[in-house]
Image (spheres, rainbow, N blue to C red):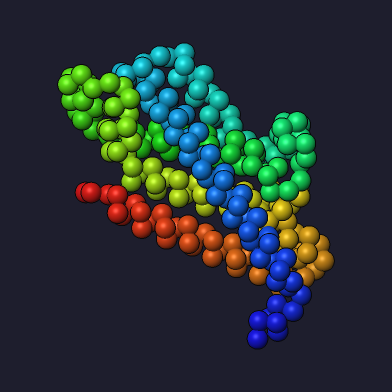
Amino acid sequence: MIEQIFPNVEWPNMWEATYETIYMTVISVIFTFIIGLLLGLLLFLTSKNNIWENRAVYLITSIIVNVFRSIPFIILIVLLIPFTRAMLGTIRGADAALPALIIGAAPFYARMVEIALREIDKGVIEAARSMGARVSTIISKVLIRESLPALVSGITVTAIALVGYTAMAGVIGAGGLGNLAFLEGFQRSRDDVTLAATIIILVIVFVIQFLGDFFTRKLDKR
């Protein structure tokens, strides 16, 4: 039955491409979460009336975030080709896509982190400060803990966007389902290959969304 619906699909290649897509997504999500969280915290803490209020630092960080968040991903990949080649020695393969994926997604997530932190009741932060809590304690025990459901929800949205980014990266040789759908499906007019790759991408997205919603509900104490 499967062979009749997808006569041109070479399943070992499809599963290898699936692994590459999942690999690129997982690694880039981990680094995006770390970098985006740090940038988001910096934006929040250096903004007006906050602990590290510093207009210059906030402005510079905000400009950097806005610039990289605004560049279309396919253009960002091209712009980062010299950097990627210098760093990894190649611009092909799953690893070569990671710099562009992380640099493209981290600023996007940083803004989501900043928004999540701004939703925290100011009274909770002031209470912690009045009791003499250190900045590190306020960050870990108040800011991150209070905003955790929103942070998980935000990284879920970002992870889904990254799946789409991996498909675009595949078009220029980064591997994964996007690369397979383009080379083996589109260029060779094998619609069943493109369809199979699309279905698997949708399954990955649905799994990410399910897990994100599950953990968001578990963490939300309201």
State which quadrant residue 22 falls in: bottom right
93, 125: nearer the viewer: 93
* 26 sits left or right of 174 in the view: left
Could you say where residue 97 lies in the image, as x and y percent from the top left? 68, 44
Residue 35 as seen in the image, left or right of residue 50: right
Tell me the residue at 33%/25% (across/down): 136
Q: Quadrant of the N terminus?
A: bottom right
Q: Does residue 108 appear anywhere in the picture? A: no
- Outermost right residue: 188
Residue sitting at 71 percent across and 69 percent down? 12
Whether residue 87 sits left or right of residue 153 in the image: it is right
Task: Please state which of residues 116 and 176 is positioned toward the viewer in this rendering.
Answer: 176
Quarter of the image where one finds residue 125: top left
Residue 139, x across and y down, in percent: 32, 29
Which residue is painted at 36% across and 16% down in the image? 53
Q: Is residue 170 left or right of residue 203?
A: right
Residue 135 drawn above or below residue 174: above
The image shows residue 4, relative to residue 32, as above or below, that is below
Tell me residue 205's x, y (percent): 52, 59
Q: Residue lying farthest bottom? A: 1
The x and y percentages for residue 91 are 76, 41
